[in-house]
Image (cartoon, coloured by chain):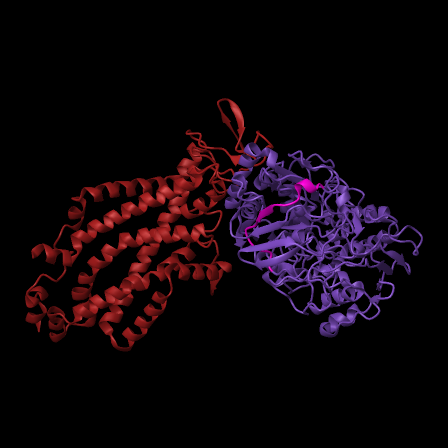
Chain colours: A purple, B red
Amino acid sequence: MRNKLTAGFAAVLLVVAAGCSSVAPITTAGSGQNGPNSTPSGASTSSGTSASAGSSTASAGASSAPAGFQSEHKGGTLKLLASGGGGTVDTQINYTNTFWQLFQNVYDGLVKFHFGVDGAASDDVVPDLATAMPKVTNDGKTYTFTLRQGIKFSNGQPVTVADVLATFQRLFKVSSPNAASWYSVLVGADACLKTPASCTLDGGVVVDPTTNQVQFNLTKPDAEFIYQLAVPFAAIIPKDSPAHDVGSNALPSTGPYMIKSYNPTTEMDLVRNPNFQVWAPEAQPEGYPDEIQYQFTLDAEAEVSAVENGQADWMFDPPPADRLSEIGTKYANQVHVNPQAAFWYVPLNTNLPPFNNIKARQAINWAVDRNAVVQLFGGSVVAQPVCTILPPGFPGHVDNCQYTKGGGTKWAAPDLAKAKELVKESGTAGQEVTVIAENYATAKSIGEYMQSLLNELGYKANLKLLSENVEFTYIQNTNNKVQLSVTQWYQDYPAASDFLQVLLSCQSFHPGSDASINIAGFCDKSINTQMDQAEALMVNDPTAGNALWSKVDQEMMAQSPIVPLFTPHIVDFLSPRVGNYHYSNVFFMCIDQLWVK
Amino acid sequence: MPTARKADARLIDGTQIAPVLRRRNIVGEVLAAPQAVVALIILVLVTLSAVLAPLYARFVAHTDPFSSQVSATITLGGKAVPVMQQSTTGLKLGVTPIGPTWSGQYFIGADNQGRDVMSRLLYGGRDSLLIGITSAIACCVIALVLGVLAGYVGGIVDGVLSRIFDVLWAFPVYLLAICLSIVLLTSRIAFGPIVIDSSSLILPIAIISIIYVPYIARPLRAQVRSLCQRGFVQASISVGSSNWRIIRRDILPNVMPSVIVYFPIMVALNILIESSLSFLGVGVQPPNASWGTIINDGLPLLYTRPLVSLAPGIMIAVTCVALNLIGDTIRDVLDPQAKIREAV
C-alpha cells in the first residue's frame, strides 16, 4: 500500500489485485488436512525473517513483548496529530496507513496481526474474534473458524456468525478496493463481482449459528488468505451496516475504543467502548488512554512544535527534514526510529523510449547514487540504500546487488562510466525524458536529482511535479506516457508477492487505466510463470517458495524495470509524558498501548 | 487643407495637452530626484550581477548551479568537508546543507541539492528580471494597442474588447495566473512547427503578460475616449487627418506618459507574480532558477539554513522597492494631474 494520508487512492489498488491474490495458506508440508498453524503465531512461519530486524529505538520504553496490563497507567487523553484526515472511516473502503493504524484499536477480525509487541512477533497472525487459528482442510481450500461467543459491538448488538457472513458480502457490495483481488479467491466471488448488490457468496462463506462456525471455501489454495483476513478490510461489522460508504459516520466496533466523532478536516475523537472486554490479549489487549483525540489541522512543521511543547503526544507525519537534526539532538529520548517494509523506487517505462531499451534501463541502475538519494531523504539513520525489490529482512529477500561499482552483495557506489557507456551502446543519448515526481520537498528533491543525473547521462530531462493527490494515479495510466517517475511502495502484509507480483507481474499491468500498479509496464512471461510457481510453493513449502521469490527478484533486477533507491525508516516523535512504545511491522506504532499517565 | 494641417493642436485647445515627451528632458527630471538615483543604482547593480552570473559560477564558485551536488565535498581550512552534512549529535538524524562559508565556494551556503545558493541567486536574478521586464514590455504593448483600438474605434470593437477585458478582470490575478500556468505547463505547446517546451521561460512570460493587460488597457481606453472628445483631436478630424495620423500625432503622445508610468511598476508586479508562481511550482521550472524557485527550495531548510529562502526574498524586495521608487518618480514627473495641481 502507499503511505498516503488520503483515501482517494484506495481505488488505485483495485487492480493490484490481479497480481497479489492467491499464494498459499500456511499448512504443514504434504498434508492438506493440517491446520495452517498449530500455534496462533503460525503465520509467522512464512516470514521467518522480519523486517523489524535491526530496529533501533532511542527510548528505553520499548521491549520485545509487553508485560501484563499495568492498570496504574490506565487513563488520560492521548493527543495525536496528522496533517490531514484519512478520508472515510469505512473499514472496508479506507486504505490508508493513517487509519489502518488507528483501526487496530477499534475493530477486530477473526484473526489479527499480533498487537502490542515489537519485532518479528508482530508479523504473526493470531486468533481474535475466532477462538483459534483456522482448521485448514480440502487441500488448503477450506478454512474453518469458530467464532467467540459473548462479544458485543459498541452499540450493544452481539457479534454473530451472521455478522461475519454479512461483512464479507459487504466487501463486494461496497466495492472494497481489494475485493476483486484478495477476496476474489472465495467461492461465489465471481458472481459478487458481477452483481455486487445481490452478493451472497454462496458456498464461499458458510456459517452455522448452532455451532458458531464460519467456513471459508476458496477456489484454490492461497497462502496469503490468512493475512487478508487480518487486515481492516476483513474486520467484522454489524450485519445491518449500510451497503455503501459510511463516510464519516463510523460503524459500530468491537475493539477497546469506538469512534465517537469524526470530522475529516478537523478531528476525530475515540472513547472507550463500553462493551469491550479482553478476550484475546495477543490480538486486542486493553488500551491505556481513556480517550484518543486525533487532530488534522496542523502541518508537519507545526506538529513538531506542538509535540516539542507537550501540546500533543505524537505526530503521524514524518518530521520535516529541517527538524530532524533538532529532534534527534534535543529530544533524542522521545524519538523512535524503526525500519519499514517498504521502498522508494523509480519505475522505468519498459514500453516507451528510451527505456524500452534494456541497456538504457540498466544504465540508470548503474548511475543512481543511492547514497545521495538517502541523503536527500534525511540521511543514513532514516534510510538505507537497496539493490533489490524485496526490502531487507522481508520474506524472500537475499542480499544481492547487480548494479554497484566493484561488485558485491550490498550497494557501494554508482558506476557512472559504465552507465554512460551503456547509454552510448543503447543509442538513446539525446532523447527527451520527463521525470514525474510528487511536489512535496522530499519527492521533489529526489526528482530534481534524477533530472540532473539524466542530463549528465546525455538525455534531455524535464521535471514535472504533480500534487501527491494525483501523481500516483497519473504515473500508472499509460495514456500519460510517463517514462520515469519517483514513487514508493509499502507492504500490506509480509509476503514477497506483495512487492514482486503486485508491482511487476503481467496481471498488474492494465494499459489505459489509472489503476495499473505495474507502472513500469513490465511483463516477462518466463518470470511470470516463476511467480505462479512461487505462489504455489508457498502453500506447502514456504522456504522453497521464498527461495524462488528471491530468484525472481534477481531476474527482475537483471531486466531492470525499476530502480530501487532505498528502504525508509519511520521516525516516531513522542511527547515526554508518553511511555510504553511498541512498534508493529505491519501497522506501525501501537497507539492505544501508549501511556500518558 | 494645408494650413489647418499645420495647426498646433495645443493652441486650438488653448491648454497644454499635447506631446509632453517631445518638449521635456524627462530623464533629467527623474534623475533630479535622489530616491530615483538610489533606486537606479540598485537596479544597475542587480542587473549587472545577474548578467555576470556565469562568470561568478565558473570562476568564483567553480560549480554548475543547475546540477545536483549531493555527494560533493569542498576544502575548507585544508580539510575536505561534505556539502551535505549528516548530523553528528544525538541520534544523528537529518542531513543539513553546508552553511555560508563567506568565501568563493558556497558563499551563502548550499541548498538541499548541494548547489551553490549564491550562484543560483545570480542566475535566478537573470530569469526573474528577464521575465519581469519582457512580460512588462509585452503587457504594455498589448494593452496600448488594444486600449487605443477600443477607445479610438469604439462601437463593436470597443464592446468586444471591453467584454474580454471584463472577463479577464473578473478573475483574481493570481488565480488566473495559476490556472493558466497549470494548463500550459502540463504539457508542451505546439503551434504547427513551433513547439514550446513546458520548461521554456516563454510560458511564464506569456502568462504574466496576459493577466495584467486589462489593468492597463482599460484606463488607456478611457483616456483615449476622453481624448477623442477634445478639441485638438476634433480639429484633426475636421481637417481630414487620417486615423493613423491622429493616433500617431494626437493620441499616442498623450497616452504614452501613462504607459511609461505603468512600466516600472509593471516590472515590479511581474517579478512578484513570477516569484509567486515559481514558488508555487507553476512558474519557472527546474533546473532553471528564479528567485521564487529558490525561496521554494529553501522552504524545507527554514529552520537550519534560513538564508536559502531569505536571500532571494531580500533580492525581490530590494528590486521591487527600487522599481516602485522609479515608477513613483516618473509619475511625479509626468502625471498631468500633478501639473494641474502645481499650476493651481
Name the spot of residue B96 as percent of width and height, x first.
Answer: 52, 35
Q: Quadrant of residue B8?
A: bottom left
Q: Can residue B104 be seen by looking at this rendering?
A: yes
B300 and A73: which is toward the camera: A73
Count of numbered marks? 0
Q: Quadrant of residue A143?
A: bottom right
Horizontally, residue A110 falls left or right of residue B45, namely right
Query: B11 above or below A51?
Result: below
Q: Can residue B86 be seen by looking at this rendering?
A: no
Horizontally, residue A495 falls left or right of residue A379, namely right
Residue A214 sits inside the magenta stretch: no
Name the spot of residue B90 as percent of width and height, x first.
Answer: 58, 30
A52 and A402: which is toward the camera: A52
User: The N terminus of chain B lies in which quarter of the figure?
Assistant: bottom left
Name the spot of residue A378 as percent of width and height, x first.
Answer: 58, 39
User: The C terminus of chain B lies in which quarter of the figure?
Assistant: bottom left
Horizontally, residue B315 falls left or right of residue A57, namely left
A18 and B140: which is toward the camera: A18
**Magenta region, residue range:** A70-87
